[in-house]
């Protein structure tokens, strides 16, 4: 793994683990929280509000921490991110355990859990740009792209590992709060290892810049945009900004926001769909089924991005068109599925479709601007990816509470519309290297 960089292997491994544990823990929480909400008696829309608020806070805090990574020690900010995650997860677990033991009313559980979760949105975003800056400052320009891309894969791997292992941490003495306690403990351990094993640094003598990344989320296809932004900022020594209304990239950002929102809305509602349509009751078994479904979706996303795109050499225009159509097919399958096997296959197809479409708009936007604006367009893409998870999950779950199949059929229409937009818009259709 660390062979792509001149960093000592043990140092790269520590930085990689810091990002892996936060991504895995965050997606593990998202896979078990629908079951927790049902067990305590919290409305589904309340669960959606928790994630939407955390994503909103992250959207504003991530650029701040990216700026701070240029001025303060990178190891310090990695520790801030890990501590924010660990403390937030510990408090969330304590609140949930109190709710499961009927020590707190459901409404109070929701309020306290939201406050505890907000700590992750505020401080958790510090680790990613600091980790990027740490790696960027210790690699040559020839090494930097591979090193940062490898570091970014921690988020993708985390979205698979988190849902896969979360059900095994549902322990008798802490019940459904177990995964949160366990991931908090792992984060504290990784933080201690970083504190003891990662050398401190001085940003003024080791120039390197990180970039804000969108929050790790179930259904959130990993994006390379923040890697490109970090690489460009390190190479030029400055952070350029791009107007969202810039005609060169506006169609790509519209497309990216649409497909990302559709993925966020349907993905966040899937846990509740598994409970209602497949499991029939909220419990350990339903948490395992949700974890399997989310793991399959994350695996299909990575297969699309690491396998299909490279094997078929698809250009951005093709990725946007065919990715949206494949996502529409998978989403229709979710709406029609009556057993778990069909549901998992349909969700994997949908995830693979989004796994093609979202890199398509990212690459297309990059090709639409010159070299000087690469960092700026990457920052805009990252902002769009984060914005998708602010309102869309709440909208999707709100529609689900009204009519369970409604968000999925609307998403089928939305994905088809995105495919037509990619065909009809001249800039999107002509987007090729």
Image (cartoon, rainbow, N blue to C red):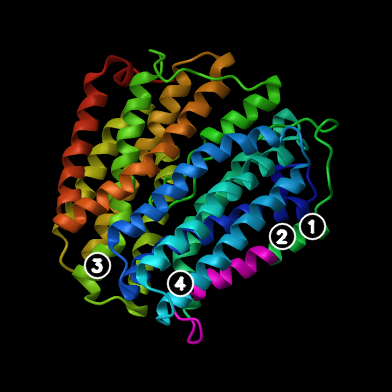
Magenta range is 171-188
Q: Earlier in the sequence, mark 2 or mark 3?
A: 2
Q: Which mark is residue 195?
A: 1
Residue that badge 4 annotates: 96
Residue that badge 3 annotates: 341
User: Vertical placement of 372 versus 396: above or below?
Assistant: above
- How far apart marks 2 and 1 lie (CA) works out to 6 Å
User: Vertical placement of 282 versus 112: above or below?
Assistant: below
User: Vertical placement of 145 versus 366: above or below?
Assistant: below
- Residue 248, percent across and down? 40, 14
- How far apart marks 4 and 3 lie (CA) works out to 31 Å
User: Vertical placement of 305 versus 142: above or below?
Assistant: below
Question: Nearer the viewer's eye, disc 4 or disc 3?
Answer: 4
* Left or right position of 17 against 170: right
Q: Is residue 145 visible?
A: no
The answer to whether mark 4 and mark 1 are in CB contact below 8 A is: no
- How far apart marks 2 and 4 lie (CA) works out to 24 Å
The answer to whether mark 3 and mark 1 are in CB contact below 8 A is: no
Q: Nearer the viewer, residue 74 or 374?
A: 74
- How far apart marks 3 and 1 lie (CA) works out to 44 Å
- Residue 12, percent across and down? 73, 50
């Amino acid at each position: 793994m660390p062979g792509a960089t001149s960093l000592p292997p043990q140092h790269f491994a520590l930085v990689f683990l810091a990002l892996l544990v936060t991504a895995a823990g965050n997606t593990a929480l998202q896979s078990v929280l629908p079951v927790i909400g049902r067990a305590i008696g919290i409305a589904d829309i309340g669960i959606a509000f928790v994630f939407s608020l955390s994503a909103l806070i992250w959207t504003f805090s991530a650029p701040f921490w990216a700026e701070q990574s240029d001025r303060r020690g990178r190891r310090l900010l990695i520790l801030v991110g890990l501590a924010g995650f660990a403390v937030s997860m510990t408090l969330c677990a304590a609140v949930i355990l109190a709710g499961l033991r009927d020590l707190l009313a459901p409404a109070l559980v929701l309020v306290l859990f939201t406050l505890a979760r907000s700590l992750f949105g505020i401080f958790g975003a510090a680790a990613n740009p600091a980790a990027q800056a740490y790696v960027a400052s210790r690699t040559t320009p020839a090494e930097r792209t591979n090193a940062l891309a490898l570091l970014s894969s921690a988020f993708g791997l985390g979205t698979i590992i988190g849902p896969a292992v979360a059900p095994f941490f549902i322990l008798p003495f802490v019940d459904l709060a177990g995964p949160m306690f366990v991931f908090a403990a792992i984060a504290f351990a990784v933080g201690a290892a970083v504190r003891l094993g990662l050398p401190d640094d001085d940003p003024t003598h080791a120039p390197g810049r990180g970039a804000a990344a969108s929050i790790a989320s179930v259904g959130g296809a990993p994006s390379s945009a923040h890697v490109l932004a970090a690489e460009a900022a390190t190479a030029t020594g400055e952070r350029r900004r791009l107007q969202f209304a810039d005609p060169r990239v506006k169609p790509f950002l519209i497309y990216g926001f649409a497909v990302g929102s559709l993925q966020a809305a349907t993905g966040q509602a899937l846990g509740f769909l598994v409970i209602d349509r497949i499991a029939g009751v909220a419990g350990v078994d339903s948490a395992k089924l949700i974890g399997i479904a989310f793991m399959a979706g994350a695996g299909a996303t990575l297969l699309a991005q690491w396998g299909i795109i490279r094997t078929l050499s698809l250009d951005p225009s093709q990725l946007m068109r065919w990715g949206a159509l494949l996502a529409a097919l998978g989403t229709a399958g979710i709406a029609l599925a009556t057993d778990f096997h069909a549901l998992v296959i349909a969700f994997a197809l949908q995830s693979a479709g989004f796994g093609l479409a979202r890199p398509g708009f990212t690459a297309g936007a990059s090709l639409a601007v010159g070299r000087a604006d690469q960092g700026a367009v990457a920052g805009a893409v990252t902002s769009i990816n984060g914005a998708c998870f602010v309102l869309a999950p709440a909208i999707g779950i709100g529609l689900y509470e009204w009519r369970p199949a409604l968000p999925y059929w609307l998403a089928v229409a939305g994905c088809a519309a995105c495919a037509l937009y990619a065909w009809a818009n001249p800039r999107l259709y002509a987007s090729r290297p």
